């Protein structure tokens, strides 16, 4: 199973609807992603399989790995992962 990480885009606010996904470059390392969130995890998630809300500081760090501009004042963003069969 290959783990695919991407960014979910949601309309701003708790009632906002799902807009879509933004791809993250495959060159981004899991260790880098883990370093961004290790202090917020209730239990270690070194494979980064859980979902995490992105704030302005993390968006700035992730932006070079995302092909589209992330605008926090317009949308909410969540780093997420899903499995894909590798056959």
Image (cartoon, rainbow, N blue to C red):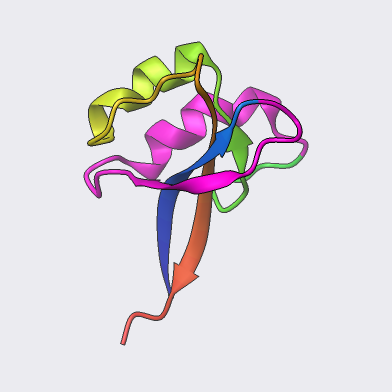
The residue shown at (75%, 35%) is 15
Residue 66 vs residue 34, the one in the foreground: 66
23 to 13, vertically: above or below: below
Q: Is 37 left, or right, of 58 in this rendering?
A: right
Q: Which residues are magenta?
A: 13-42
- Which x, y percent locates residue 45? 61, 45
Q: Is residue 47 visible?
A: no
72 to 76, vertically: above or below: above
Seen from this angle, which residue lies furthest bottom? Answer: 87
- Which x, y percent locates residue 36? 50, 25
6 to 68, vertically: above or below: below
14 to 61, vertically: above or below: below
The residue shown at (51%, 14%) is 73
Q: Is residue 68 visible?
A: yes
Tell how many labels. 0
The residue shown at (41%, 20%) is 71
Residue 72 vs residue 79, the one in the foreground: 72
Location of the C terminus by quadrant is: bottom left
Examine the structure image and report whether residue 1 is included in the region drawn in magenta: no
Examine the structure image and report whether residue 26 is included in the region drawn in magenta: yes
Q: Is 81 left, or right, of 64 in this rendering?
A: right
């Amino acid at each position: 199973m290959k783990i695919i990480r991407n960014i979910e885009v949601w309309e701003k606010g708790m009632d906002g609807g799902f807009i879509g996904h933004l791809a993250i470059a495959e060159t981004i390392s899991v260790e880098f992603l883990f370093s961004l969130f290790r202090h917020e995890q209730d239990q270690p998630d070194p494979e980064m399989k859980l979902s995490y809300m992105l704030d302005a500081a993390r968006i700035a760090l992730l932006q070079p790995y995302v092909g589209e501009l992330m605008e926090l004042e317009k949308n909410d963003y969540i780093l997420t992962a899903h499995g894909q069969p590798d056959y």
